[in-house]
Amino acid sequence: MPRQVSRGDEPLRIDQQPVWDLPVRLVHWLLAALIGFSWWSIENHHTDWHIWSGIAILTLLFFRLLWGLFGSSTARFSSFVRGPAAVRQYLGGQWSGIGHTPLGALSVLALFGAVAIQVGLGLFNEDEDGLYAGPLASMVDIDTGDKIRELHEAWFNVVLGLIILHVAAIVFYRLFRGKKLTTPMITGKAALDPAAQPMRPGKWWVALLCLAAAFAFSRWVVAGAPPL
Amino acid sequence: MRVLVIAATCVLVACGGSQSSQANNADSNAAAANATAAAVAAPVSGAKAAAIMRERHEGMEAIGKATKQLRRELGGGSPDIAAVRGSAAKIAGLSKKASGWFPAGTGPDVGKTGAKPEIWQDPKDFAAKLASFQRAAAAFNGAASGGDESTIQARYSDLGGTCKACHDKYRAETNR
């Protein structure tokens, strides 16, 4: 979450500075759209679409994992994954920087983790009638597949709970902290403390390599994860 | 991009499947549909309805289980032909019994079932879809006995298409 300049102090240059690069924003909004589509498609019995939506989410997650290692500074896990001490400092008002706050980072990790578990369960999933199956469903026996289906259904509630918490936090920051968190996720820019370390952008060709690797990984999973 | 291409291919394959099942419908309507339409028409009640609904549930569950076993064989590299034959015979046998599984009076108003009321609102269409499933099950069983893998795969795909065609319209979810 970008830290904004508090108003009313000395007259500051409130420059709009980059905080989220294009890959981060695209992953965020595509993920939101695909999670919605996955829910809608399975509720309306479009099981094929649901499976492909899950594969698309898998691709996004894998890309984001790589971009979290090789991407822009605010995208990197090393810049926002911190321990409980940093969270306490943040809650005590003693934190400055750009990108995810220590508390927001926990939300990011929880959301990515929950969605990754959901997609992972989906890969081994199989419908009750045996007509549709995730690409890895044949790796587990039929009874295990039935249990995975129940877990996949139940785990959606965890994902949904985290999404509700995520949106509630955004509303909270807007109403009680005067921070607009949605706009930077669209434009990529926020009014930041001019003293803060600016975002170091990633390289476009690294993004393309990460994307190619993510597609290759998905393709391998879709093929049933054959031995390499 | 690659994923999209694969997705598009799957959509095409799915369309092809439903077209061939429509073709099956057309030439099987006359023969098998008549018998099934009779079964749909004759109403039952009480203990007999409950017994049929139980048999139907267990039969469908067994067909589902055989389908899942088939995917484990046919989805991978080297299918166990004996296992494929066993599942194919099981589905073909149960598909014949299915003609007696849908008399009027065994719908969701009577007890818990995945059978939608639409079955008895459009019995002719339902009977045609059931008949095409029975034909596909018999054809797949024949292919399995033959042992040619590409024929087995093609008939397996046809069979899945007939299951989906019927379930899309007439099967409700019961586990929610």
Image (cartoon, rainbow, N blue to C red):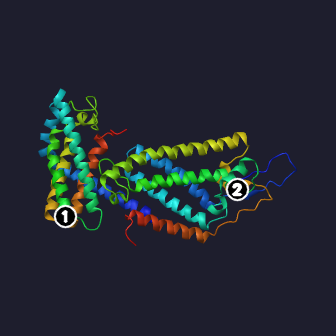
Q: Amino acid at mark 1?
A: Ile
Disc number for residue B81: 1
Please tell me in which quadrant of the rendered image residue A44 appears.
top left
Binning the other alpha carbons within 10 Å of mark 1 as few (below 14), some (14 to 19) or many (20 upward) gives some
Q: Label 2 belongs to which residue? A: A189
Looking at the rendered structure, the number of numbered marks drawn on it comes to: 2
- Give the percent coordinates (x, y) of residue A119: 45, 54
Between B3 and B26, the one lying in front of the other is B3
Question: Of all residues shown, which one is farthest toward the right?
Answer: A10
- Give the percent coordinates (x, y) of residue B167: 29, 44
Disc number for residue B127: none
Tell me the quarter of the image containing the C terminus of chain B: top left
Q: Label 2, label 1: how many angstroms apart (C-alpha)?
A: 61 Å
Which is in the foreground here, disc 2 or disc 1? 1
Q: Is residue A65 visible?
A: yes
Q: Secondary structure at mark 1?
A: helix
- Give the percent coordinates (x, y) of residue B61: 25, 45
Q: What residue appears at the point 77 percent right and 59 percent down from the top-left corner?
A: A196
Q: What residue appears at the point 25 percent right and 57 percent down from the top-left corner?
A: B70
Q: Is residue A46 visible?
A: no
Binning the other alpha carbons within 10 Å of mark 2 as few (below 14), some (14 to 19) or many (20 upward) gives some
Q: What residue appears at the point 18 percent right and 35 percent down from the top-left corner?
A: B52
Please tell me in which quadrant of the rendered image residue A99 appears.
bottom right
Please tell me in which quadrant of the rendered image residue A168 appears.
top right
Q: Amino acid at mark 2?
A: Lys
Is disc 2 in contact with disc 1, using a CB cutoff of under 8 Å?
no
Question: Of all residues shown, which one is farthest toward the top?
Answer: B46
Question: Of all residues shown, which one is farthest toward the front?
Answer: A85
